[in-house]
Image: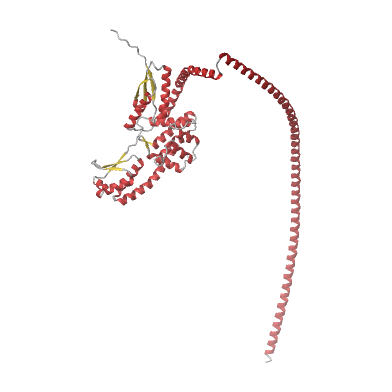
Amino acid sequence: MREILPILLTLLLGTSAGIGLTVFIAYLRGNSIANKANKMIEDAKKEAEKQKRDRILELKEEGYKLKQEAERDIKEKKEELKVTEDRLLQRENSLDKRDEMLQKREVTLEEKENHLLASQKELQTKSEKVDEMLKEEMTRLESIAKFSKEKAHDLIMKRTEEKMAQELALFMKEKEHEAKLTASENAKNLIVESMQRYAEDVATEQTVSTINLPNDDMKGRLIGREGRNIRTIEAVTGVDLIIDDTPETIVISSFDPLRREIAKITIETLIKDGRIHPSRIEEIYDKVCKDMNNKITELGNQACYDLGLIKVDPELVYLIGKLHFRTSFGQNALKHSKEVGELCGLMAAELGENVMLAKRAGLLHDIGKSIDYEMEGSHVEIGVDIAKKYHEDPIVINAIASHHGDNPATHIISVLVNIADTLSAARPGARNDSLDNYMKRLEQLEEIGNSFEGVEKTFAMQAGREVRVMVKPEEIDDVTAYKIAREMKEKIESEMQYPGTIKIIVIRESRAQEEAK
């Protein structure tokens, strides 16, 4: 027990000493941290003061600079204001001078106006006196001549008309001859050069298409049991299908090229497919019609591309493409329209006119033919309506309206379209004409020639391109013969429809005949 007490005392003393030492060390550390914290606070205050002073200096410098800039701007503004004031003063002075000049002019004009009024009054008085004197003189002359003014006027006009009729006819003949010497040669050169530069093969459209068959057995399949297939094809497509003894060939007949082309593609598709029955025929026909619309649009786009035309409405492009399946006397309407556009462009270039506008007018001149079978009215009227609907240029509209002479041409491009249309239609082989129409045209030409007084006989020659009129020499003189040719030309143009041009020749021949015995 006595041995444990010293140990316990030693432990207590050691523990007390450790605790005291620990408290003392903690105290020392607390003082050190507090000193460091105080030092850091003082350093931060010093740094803040320094930054504050630096910022104040920077602000003062910026304020000084701004002040200098403001003073500089104020100085510049003052100088500008001074210059402006000087200008205003100068303008004010000039306005004052002008005001003085205007006042002087007003005074001068008033004086001149007063002078003119006085002169006008004098002239009016003199004019009234002259009128009175003329009336008195006219009354005296009528009483002396015993002839009224109206009768004298009518008599003089009648004699003048009789006298001038022959002179006017001779004058017109001479002037037209002079114009022909130069204008005809220039026009021929221009047209020939344009035709040479545009060399396109002439190909007329027929009214039938042929389809080659792989074998003659296909004819029976196309006819079908009791002819049901061929009846369905003809009913759906609207064409006549001719199946005869010609080996491995059938013929599609129709005056509508669009129907004929659709029918041809439909039958060729059926032959390749091998399944030929009424329901399949209708199915293929519907599909071909949809594909044909795309083909028509492609044809229209190609025509515009070939002529270099841009900004054409898509619906108008479709109508242009439909012209490919329209014909005029066997001539393909789209090829004819492209040819007219090319010729118009060539002639417009020679004359210095707008080439693109001329090509556009030439291409669209027969646009009414694309739908003239779907609605009432001539293709000219329909074409004008279409052009107005798609906001075409007024020159293009006038070219469409005047290319058959229905309306007057108001621009040189309209005349070029008329010329190009005639050239395209008159090219050898460009158009086919039926014998009945040909004979009727010749008869009508001879009837028009024989309708004039003094005409002995009329002969239509050169397939209706030339008319020779024989007149009685004892009744018709040379001047009257010229008048007959001109009047006959106007009558043919107003009453007949014909391709190309018609040459009119009036022949007056005197023969003296005796018989020696």
Image location of residue 162, percent across then percent down:
48, 17
Image location of residue 232, percent across then percent down:
30, 48
Foreground pick, 29 / 43: 43
286 left or right of 183 in image = left
Image location of residue 213, percent across then percent down:
27, 44
Locate residue 425: give its quadrant. top left
55 left or right of 219 in image = right
Task: Say how many tags the image has.
Answer: 0
Image location of residue 109, percent across then percent down:
72, 27
Residue at image point 74% right, 33% down: 95
Q: Specify whether residue 241 is in view.
A: yes
Assign the N terminus to one quadrant of the image.
Answer: bottom right
Compared to 30, does 280 lie above or below?
above
Compared to 276, does 485 lie above or below?
above
113 left or right of 507 in image = right
The colouring scheme, among rainbow, by chain, secondary structure or one colour, is: secondary structure
Foreground pick, 408 / 264: 408
Assign the C terminus to one quadrant of the image.
Answer: top left
Compared to 86, does 34 lie above or below?
below
Foreground pick, 278 / 336: 278
Of all residues, the one furthest to the bottom in this rendering is 1
Residue at image point 44% right, 37% down: 381
